Image: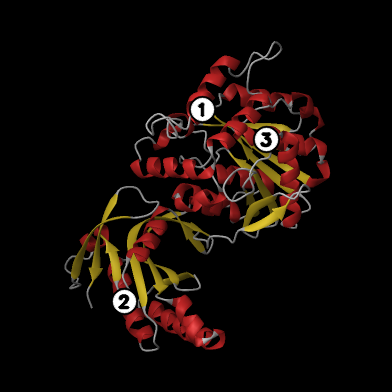
């Protein structure tokens, strides 16, 4: 599924602080992400295909509410008191109110887990369920708690990680082997990780969040939680050992425990179907479409200069022209055997059984809409896609979208895979060189299909 990046809105906490949040999906269940397990902003997800895909999967069965805690991303900074569980929980309720959610399931990863437990225990009428991912009731060891990390070891780790003078190789990216070891061979992911980490939180805010994690202890509240809980933990997680998740599940009477065959702390960075597990827990069903994969050619089109055209023509005239664009596009898709997945406002997403028909169709669409004063750019890629009801998802879809973004006006840009598969078709291509596609690993050699 490809979704438009949701509009950022703001909630106002009781003390006047502004909290940035977004809402995606429209399912019958409200699912609020109390914390994503990092100090990255809500906006960072749209630059990483795996994260975007995870959120899109959640949005297929739930109305997903995400927000930046204080000090993170687009929200107001932390106050002098730093980060506390009570304030974090109060901010979550303020976001729920602004999103018009009276009751929601809470999804929390890492240091936001104790906040979700606190909220479920103190506001049971607002919480319909808990999804606790790679988190804990208490993180550091104590006299009556032999689990977790020795205090001095944890403090040393935090000091090294948030040091603003640390070199890039040992600073902001140094936690990647702990957070997402499955991505260590992915250069694109590593670059995104470093940049997104730097943009998300200042060293002071990061330190405040690590202190919140260190000092949180909600063991006494576990018996007060009334909502059903799903405790999920990666079996080989070295950032938050699985013994902490097992303790949490063993001492929360309403909890069930799921251990995943993974070492990643991030819930979306590897190939486990956590979204399907969450769907089954919250709705009682798990659609088989999550695993319905097939080979397809993906076409994206995008209208060039749509904002400027709408401004010069006026809303009514531009709407009429868009309607004609859609009609002409659908006619050509039908002619060449394409399947319209969705319109994107300024273009379409379609799939084909083969790349030759996709290119011919893109050429025909471009010629047709040019007659009504509209120019488009097109991107085509072929690979395995995941069918979800009437929508499609997967890295192939994301790649085709990025190829479209790289195209010039009136250009049909395709991947090298496509050119190899249409050899002998009579279609001629011009080499457009190597490109880095945002959020897609590696460099890509792209070619323009000539009319």
Q: Is residue 149 above or below residue 346?
A: above
Identify residue for label 1.
Answer: 237
**Residue 426: % across, % down:** 17, 73
- First of labels 2, 1 by sequence position: 1
- Look at 59% across and 30% down and name the residue there: 210
Compared across the picture, whether 40 is left or right of 449 comes to right
**Residue 233: % across, % down:** 58, 31
Say whether residue 357 is visible: yes
Mark 3 closeness class: few <14, some 14–19, many ≥20 residues within 10 Å: many
Residue 83 numbered mark, or none:
3
Q: Is residue 443 above or below residue 433?
A: above
Tell me the quarter of the image containing the C terminus. Answer: bottom left
- First of labels 1, 3 by sequence position: 3
Identify residue for label 2.
Answer: 410
**Residue 181: % across, % down:** 42, 32
C-alpha separation, residue under disc 2 versus residue under disc 3 = 51 Å
Q: Quadrant of residue 300?
A: bottom left
Nearer-the-camera pick, 328 or 102:
102
Mark 1 closeness class: few <14, some 14–19, many ≥20 residues within 10 Å: many
């Amino acid at each position: 599924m490809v979704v438009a990046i949701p509009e950022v809105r703001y909630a106002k906490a009781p003390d006047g602080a502004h909290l940035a949040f977004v809402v995606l999906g429209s399912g019958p269940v409200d699912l609020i992400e109390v914390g994503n397990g990092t100090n990255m902003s809500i906006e960072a997800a749209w630059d990483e295909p795996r994260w975007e895909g995870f959120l899109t999967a959640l949005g297929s069965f739930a109305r997903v509410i995400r927000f930046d805690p204080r000090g993170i991303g687009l929200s107001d900074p932390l106050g002098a008191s730093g980060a506390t569980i009570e304030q974090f929980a109060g901010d979550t309720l303020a976001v729920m109110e602004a999103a018009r959610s009276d009751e929601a399931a809470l999804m929390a990863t890492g240091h936001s887990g104790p906040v979700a437990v606190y909220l479920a225990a103190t506001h049971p009428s607002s919480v319909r369920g808990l999804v606790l991912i790679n988190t804990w009731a208490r993180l550091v060891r104590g006299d009556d708690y032999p689990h977790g990390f020795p205090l001095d070891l944890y403090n040393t780790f935090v000091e090294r990680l948030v040091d603003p003078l640390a070199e890039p190789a040992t600073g902001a990216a140094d936690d990647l082997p702990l957070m997402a070891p499955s991505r260590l061979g992915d250069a694109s992911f590593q670059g995104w990780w470093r940049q997104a980490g730097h943009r998300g939180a200042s060293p002071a805010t990061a330190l405040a969040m690590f202190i919140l994690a260190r000092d949180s202890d909600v063991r006494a509240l576990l018996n007060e939680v009334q909502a059903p809980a799903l405790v999920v933990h990666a079996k080989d997680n070295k950032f938050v050992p699985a013994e902490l998740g097992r303790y949490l599940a063993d001492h929360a009477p309403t909890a069930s425990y799921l251990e995943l065959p993974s070492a990643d702390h991030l819930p979306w960075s590897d190939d486990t179907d956590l979204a399907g597990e969450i769907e089954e827990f919250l709705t009682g069903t798990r659609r088989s479409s999550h695993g319905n994969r097939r080979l397809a050619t993906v076409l994206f089109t995008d209208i060039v200069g749509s904002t400027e055209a709408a401004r010069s023509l006026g809303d009514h005239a531009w709407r009429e022209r868009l309607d004609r664009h859609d009609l002409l596009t659908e006619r050509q898709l039908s002619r060449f055997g394409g399947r319209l997945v969705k319109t994107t406002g300024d273009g379409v997403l379609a799939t084909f059984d083969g790349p030759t028909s996709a290119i011919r169709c893109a050429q025909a669409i471009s010629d047709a809409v040019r007659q009504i004063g509209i120019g488009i750019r097109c991107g085509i890629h072929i690979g395995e896609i995941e069918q979800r009801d009437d929508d499609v998802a997967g890295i192939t879809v994301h790649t085709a979208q990025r190829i479209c973004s790289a195209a010039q006006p009136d250009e049909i840009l395709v991947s090298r895979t496509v050119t190899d598969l249409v050899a002998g078709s009579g279609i001629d291509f011009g080499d457009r060189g190597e490109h880095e596609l945002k959020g897609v690993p590696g460099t890509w050699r792209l070619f323009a299909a000539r009319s």
